[in-house]
Image (cartoon, rainbow, N blue to C red):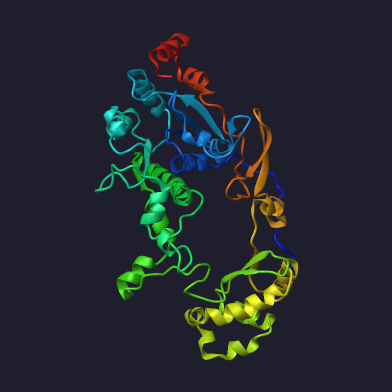
């Protein structure tokens, strides 16, 4: 059977979100990531930052020649301008921009836009078709609404940290912005949903995205289990309470692989492969949960076999047996992985400041209207004058705003 190949015909139309204008007022990760996802598929995204306090993501993580690398990813496909929304000129300018936009993304604490007379009443009066997307830690109402909120708190509150880590160890937080990233993807979906509704009604609306909620959704049926059975999922390390063998195993050459047996047929193939077919006949082997209860026996069988073979030998044998395995890879491995290369998951983008940059490509492939990366994150305020000129402001008006401190 011939494996499917990527489309070779050129795209037939413009990117699917062409004509959509997004004002990205948010900082750090969830809100800006949502805007990035929209920009990757053709939306015009204007990143609005404070004149003296730019998005902190510009300074997060390693930099090269004083240029933050995280921003190059998060700020791609965005034009950048500065605006102090707390000034009269900044407020008026934002309202003028909002009148031309389809979406505003913000992540100020609830009440902040209202304090500046830029709440939903004012924005929707300027543009009744506008979708105002509000991304906060805890949502726009409730007892925690005005607390400072970050993804780490969502990872803690949602139950994620409670089930992550070794059984005899502490709850474990992820070493990256997991909850923010999940919320960013969910926010992009929410924006498109609100825009679809606008196509029917002609009216915009408010999107209220609480970062604590999407991560709870992806954790699965934990609330349902507790509601119906009183079951609280424990920390199990790399093991699962639903199936076994499921773990990471060290190979003879000191490398690591991950094995998963969510399907009964795969579990049987693995045990035959490692030379322990008698375990398949055990009464408990027919149930994923019962296999999980016997994980010590299964890990000894699978881990012992893997420990006698190199990683390359393990992967070759598992593939031949049609059993599920993957190497544990760090970023060095990812950058040269042939499957990622085949999919075009990583791409090279030219940057005026740093030259060619390799980064993740757009999130998915569309055969007829693909997305693309036009440029990496631009310098702070690089497009301020151009955006305002396009908005109809004169050089004198721009100079007045700059003198006022609005830019």
Above or below, comparing residue 398 to residue 375 in the picture: above
Q: Position of residue 255 (x, y in %)?
A: 68, 64
**Depth order, front residue of 194/252:** 252
Q: Position of residue 368 (x, y in %)?
A: 62, 47
Q: Quadrant of residue 355?
A: top right
Relative side of 264 to 335, left or right: left
Could you tell me which residue is drawn at 44 percent across and 36 percent down? 27
Could you tell me which residue is drawn at 40 percent across and 62 percent down? 162
**Depth order, front residue of 82/14:** 82
- Farthest residue in the left direction? 143
**Depth order, front residue of 84/239:** 239
Quarter of the picture containing the C terminus is top left
Q: Position of residue 222 (x, y in %)?
A: 38, 67
Above or below, comparing residue 369 to residue 100 in the picture: below
Quarter of the picture containing the N terminus is bottom right
Could you tell me which residue is drawn at 53 percent across and 29 percent down? 79
**Depth order, front residue of 6/178:** 178
Is any atom of residue 119 visible in this view? no
Q: Quadrant of residue 213?
A: bottom left
Above or below, comparing residue 179 to residue 403 in the picture: below
How many numbered marks, from 0 up? 0
Relative side of 233 to 371, left or right: left
Relative side of 67 to 385, left or right: right
């Amino acid at each position: 059977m011939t494996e499917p190949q990527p489309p070779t015909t050129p795209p037939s139309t413009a990117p699917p979100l062409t004509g959509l204008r997004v004002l990205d007022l948010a900082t750090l990760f969830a809100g800006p990531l949502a805007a990035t996802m929209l920009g990757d598929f053709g939306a015009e995204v204007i990143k609005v930052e404070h004149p003296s306090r730019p998005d902190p993501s510009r300074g997060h993580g390693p930099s090269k020649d004083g240029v933050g690398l995280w921003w190059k990813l998060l700020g791609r496909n965005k034009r950048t301008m500065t605006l102090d929304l707390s000034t009269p000129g900044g407020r008026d300018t934002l309202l003028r921009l909002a009148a031309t936009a389809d979406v505003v993304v913000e992540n100020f604490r609830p009440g902040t836009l209202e304090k500046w007379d830029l709440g939903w009443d004012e924005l929707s009066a300027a543009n009744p078709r506008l979708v105002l997307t509000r991304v906060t830690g805890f949502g726009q109402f409730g007892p925690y609404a005005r607390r400072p909120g970050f993804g780490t708190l969502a990872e803690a509150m949602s139950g994620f940290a409670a089930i992550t880590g070794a059984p005899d160890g502490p709850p474990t937080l992820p070493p990256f912005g997991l909850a923010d990233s999940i919320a960013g993807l969910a926010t992009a979906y929410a924006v498109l949903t609100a825009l679809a509704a606008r196509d029917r009604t002609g009216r915009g609306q408010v999107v209220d995205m609480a970062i604590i909620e999407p991560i709870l959704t992806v954790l699965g049926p934990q609330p349902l289990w507790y509601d119906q059975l009183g079951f609280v999922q424990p920390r199990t390390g790399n093991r699962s309470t639903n199936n076994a063998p499921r773990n990471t195993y060290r190979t003879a050459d000191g490398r690591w692989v991950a094995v998963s047996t969510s399907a009964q047929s795969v579990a049987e193939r693995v045990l035959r492969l490692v030379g322990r077919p008698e375990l398949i006949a055990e009464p408990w082997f027919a149930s994923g949960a019962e296999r999980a209860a016997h994980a010590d026996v299964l890990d000894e069988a699978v881990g012992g076999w893997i420990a006698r073979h190199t990683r390359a030998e393990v992967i070759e044998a598992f593939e031949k047996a049609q059993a599920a395995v993957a190497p544990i890879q760090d970023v060095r491995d990812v950058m040269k992985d042939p499957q990622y290369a085949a999919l075009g998951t990583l791409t090279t983008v030219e940057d005026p400041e740093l030259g060619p940059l390799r980064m993740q490509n757009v999130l998915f492939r569309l055969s007829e209207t693909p997305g693309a990366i036009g440029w990496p994150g631009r310098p702070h305020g690089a497009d301020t004058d151009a955006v305002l000129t396009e908005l109809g402001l004169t050089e004198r008006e721009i100079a007045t705003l700059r003198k006022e401190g609005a830019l």
